[in-house]
Amino acid sequence: MIDDAHLLTDTDVRRLTELADDPHRSGEKMVIAAPLFHSWGFINSVFALTLGATIILDRRFDPALTMERVDDHSADVLVAVPVMLQMILELPPEKKDHLRAENLKITTQLDLRIAEM
């Protein structure tokens, strides 16, 4: 028996369709900060593998280290969830002033909506 919680909604299908129009290209370097057990990290890793992209991963998320990976590997794409991007933006100046992200062309994030209680 299938639990209703695991069925795709119209919104889920619409979002998956939007992903099909994703601007990723073959041969890109992708820093995937979102964990692979999270749907956003997993689906982007599948896209990357399908495209033959280089995937850069870390065992744990660290905002400064993630941006250093973007710089060190001249990454084209950063895949994160909103809270991760917020943590990157909130880095103190001494930890982010030297970061450039010069090759970064795409930053993807999952649009997460939290229901009001």
Image (cartoon, rainbow, N blue to C red):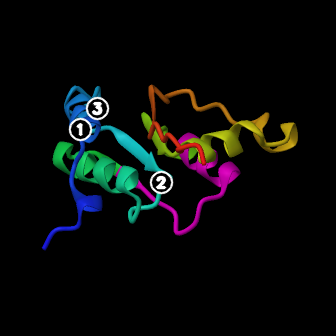
Tell me the residue at 48%/54% (across/down): 34
Secondary structure at numbered mark 2: loop
CA distance for labels 1 and 2: 17 Å
Q: Position of residue 5 (x, y in %)?
A: 29, 60
Residue named by callout 1 = 16
First of labels 3, 2 by sequence position: 3
Residue 49 location (% of width, % of height): 22, 52
Q: Local crowd at mark 1 within 10 Å, few (<14), some, or many (≥20)? A: few
Residue 24: give its label. Answer: 3
Please give the residue where the numbered disc 2 appears in the rendered image. 34
At 33% from the left edge and 56% from the top edge, which residue is drawn? 42
Alpha carbon separation for disc pair 3 and 2 = 17 Å
Q: Which dot marks residue 41?
A: none
- Compare residues 88 and 39 and report the one nearer the observer: 39
Is 13 a magenta residue? no
Q: Is residue 9 or residue 61 the one in the foreground?
A: 9
In front: label 3 or label 1: 1
- Residue at the left extreme of this rendering: 1
Residue farthest to the front, as pictured: 117
Task: Confirm whether the magenta stretch covers residue 66.
Answer: yes
Q: Secondary structure at mark 1?
A: helix
Q: How many marks?
A: 3
Q: Earlier in the sequence, mark 1 or mark 2?
A: 1
